[in-house]
Amino acid sequence: MDGEVRGGRGAGDVIVLGGGVIGLSTALVLAEQGRRVRVWTRDPARATTSAVAGALWWPYRIEPEAPVGAWSLTSLRVYEQLALRPPETGVRMVPGVHAGVELGGLGPWARRLTDLRQLPAGETPGGYGSALWARLPLIDMPVHLDWLRTRLETAGAVVESREVRSLDEAAAEAPVVVNCAGLGARDLVPDPDVTPVRGQLVLVENPGIDSWFTAADDVSHLTTYFFPQPGRLILGGTAEPGERSLEPDPATAAAIVGRCAEIRPEIAGAQIIGHRVGLRPVRSKGVRLEVDPGTSATRLIHNYGHGGAGVTVAWGCAYASAALAS
């Protein structure tokens, strides 16, 4: 396939707005279906919110429940295959514990997971009343985003550094536009239901931990988790609605380390090697994945509002978007 588009509105042309995991996954599915794809992105992939993510597969605080379950399972099957080549794709299948979660409280999607079981009370870490053990995809996002970009280019797609100020800009150049702008959709659409939810992480040298742990506080913005990634252990975290600061807060970082050390004491002495802050693109009405009813000449597809679960639903939403583009 010719990877260069020289203007015009060919019948197979698609412009994807956004260079995070949602945009790149969607663009890749379209390109490998034979479409001529251009990705317009303001930031390189490693400078997007996606690059900051932990990133564990799990349908976390994302609606609507029914399609999210299907999207998540589609993504899970893709990640299981990508995990056969972890150095290349950044995807590994890693065991761990979800604390404070009951198997019966999960959606129908959970019955499709073979490596998922309720822990007996005596095996629950950190004094939590309930917990699940699971083996799930854990994605090293910088590596995975690089892999997506390389595979995109192999498929003939073009990634362009371009800040879009209006959907009309893209509509003027392609018959199909897929809006994967994340938080940018708030102003681009515009959609006031999209708001930032700030997440802060701490990166430390791994003291020998080879499994992940998560526990969310449903009544506050605090979460506790650690994810072993190659060369580091990622500690979290926060979920602060409406906060936009990208500067790491020292007190918040210290509290994160402290909470994680309550689960694994060796974390307390781990050398800190970095801090990360990202703004999750949460939409109060849930994910928007649909054809915009207000467009005609250009088919405009919205695929945004995934919050902190973009990695979890990326491939499912990509295939759903490609189906709408047909």
Image (spheres, rainbow, N blue to C red):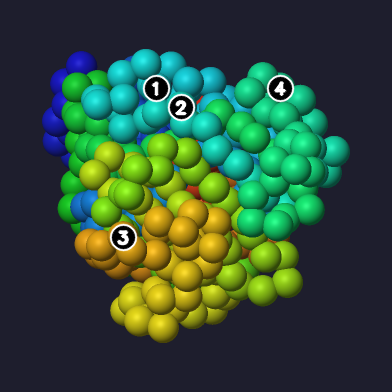
Q: Which residue is mark 1?
A: 83
* Circle number at residue 112: 4
* Amino acid type at mark 4: Arg
Dot placed on the residue nearer the N-terminal end, 4 or 3: 4
* Circle number at residue 93: 2
Residue 266 lies, in percent from the top left, at 40, 56
C-alpha span from label 2 to label 4: 16 Å
Circles 4 and 1, Cβ within 8 Å, touching? The answer is no
Closer to us: mark 4 or mark 3? Answer: 3
Q: Give the SS element for disc 4.
A: helix
Circles 2 and 1, Cβ within 8 Å, touching? The answer is yes
Q: Which residue is mark 3?
A: 270
* Amino acid type at mark 2: Met
Badge 1: how crowded within 10 Å, few (<14), some, or many (20+)? many
Q: Is residue 1 visible?
A: yes
Q: Quadrant of residue 141?
A: top left
